[in-house]
Amino acid sequence: MIVDDAARLPGLDEILDRVRVVAIPLHTRFRGQALREIALFEGPEGWTEFSPFLEYEDAEAAAWLRGAIEFGWSPTPGSSAGRTEIMVNATLPAVPADQVERVLAHYDGCRTVKVKVAERGQTIDDDVARVRATRAMLGAEGRIRIDANGAWNVDEAEHAIHSLCEFDLEYVEQPCASVEELAEIRSRVKYMGIPIAADESVRKASDPLAVARAGAADILIVKAQPLGGVARALAIVREAGLPAVVSSALESSVGIAMGAYLAAALPTLDYDCGLATVDLFDGDVVPPDQSLVPRGGRIPVRRPDVDPELLERHRAYADRIEWWRARITRCHALLAAGA
Ligand SMILES: O=C(O)CCC(=O)c1ccccc1C(=O)O
Ligand SMILES: [Mg+2]
């Protein structure tokens, strides 16, 4: 255990009495999904979000519940260096090149774009066309990072990085699935000066520090909710001793706020954060003046107020609400048992 979790675990009823479940449509499919289901509840410190993806097992989802509880029940994390705004990147799903302009038009003023690559059913030519179109839109000064979500083997990753390096990549996120493969691809492309970032190898690993210990990445991607909260994410960054990029998990403005506080609390923040994904939604749970969609490439560091009317407008169907209540019950039991 790398942090003492000072916060007590609230009782299950305390959570279930307050939980609201919403389903928010996406204007562009992401991870194959066109609808995002999210559970929200209000703790003594404010609203918080629990939104592990539907297919995740309870053991993994329980870490997200720990993160959600921390944000609702622990004092709001303090900011480092007086940061009150966070610079964020646009996130571009693996769309055809002719849709790049339409999707990026949703993001106001982002100088950095993360391009999703290696989508199942697509080829490297699709990735090259998408990244080329992104570079054409951003101009020479924009920053482009790519994220393969571990889909390539080492040879595929090497070929892909060679094919994409002409577009000047800031870093390559999770090109391969395992820590061993990451270490191998990192050493193969080191001469090109393109850093390797680890995402799933941190947030899905039984040991989030293994990737740093193995020298398998140059950069850590950290996400508050999946890592069990801001305090745990900060501890991982501290112990890993690597530069960190704060990202998120396709959350509403409430979950994004958790990420904004993590970004604000980091001692150094050299990279734009993956906290702009509310722009992929057709709807939110907070009023427009409270929203954490980026303006001028930045989001504010604050807890947004939830709008009860929007909770109602996006309310999930009764069977889905029951499903989420059962999931919260199981994950709470895992946390209570010391998971
Ligand atoms: O980092 C970003 O730009 C946005 C967040 C993002 O890409 C993401 C969102 C949901 C699930 C997985 C991922 C990912 O980084 O792989
Ligand atoms: Mg990623």
Image (tube, grey):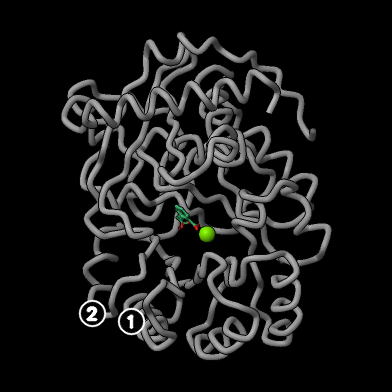
The answer to whether marks 1 and 2 mark residues whose Cβ atoms lie closer than 8 Å is yes
Q: Residue 78 lies in what quarter of the image?
A: top right
Query: Secondary structure under badge 2?
Result: helix
Q: Quadrant of the N terminus?
A: top right
Of 33 and 270, the residue lying toward us: 33
Rendered residue at 44%/73% (across/down): 117
Q: Quadrant of the C terminus?
A: top right
Rendered residue at 33%/60% (across/down): 32
Q: With 16 as the anchor, is 26 left or right in this view?
A: left
Mark 2 Cα-neighbour bin, 10 Å: few <14, some 14–19, many ≥20: few
Q: With 253 as the anchor, is 179 left or right in this view?
A: right
Instruction: Where is residue 124? Give x, y as percent.
Output: 44, 85
Instruction: Where is residue 270? Give x, y as percent.
Output: 61, 57
Q: With 97 as the anchor, is 166 left or right in this view?
A: right
Looking at the image, residue 136 lies above or below residue 11: below
Looking at the image, residue 327 lies above or below residue 248: above
Q: In the rendered structure, which amino acid carries the disc numbered 2?
A: Asp
Q: Which mark is residue 98?
A: 2
Earlier residue among tags 1 and 2: 2
Q: In the rendered structure, which amino acid carries the disc numbered 1?
A: Ala
- For label 1, the residue is 133
Q: Residue 308 lies in what quarter of the image?
A: top left
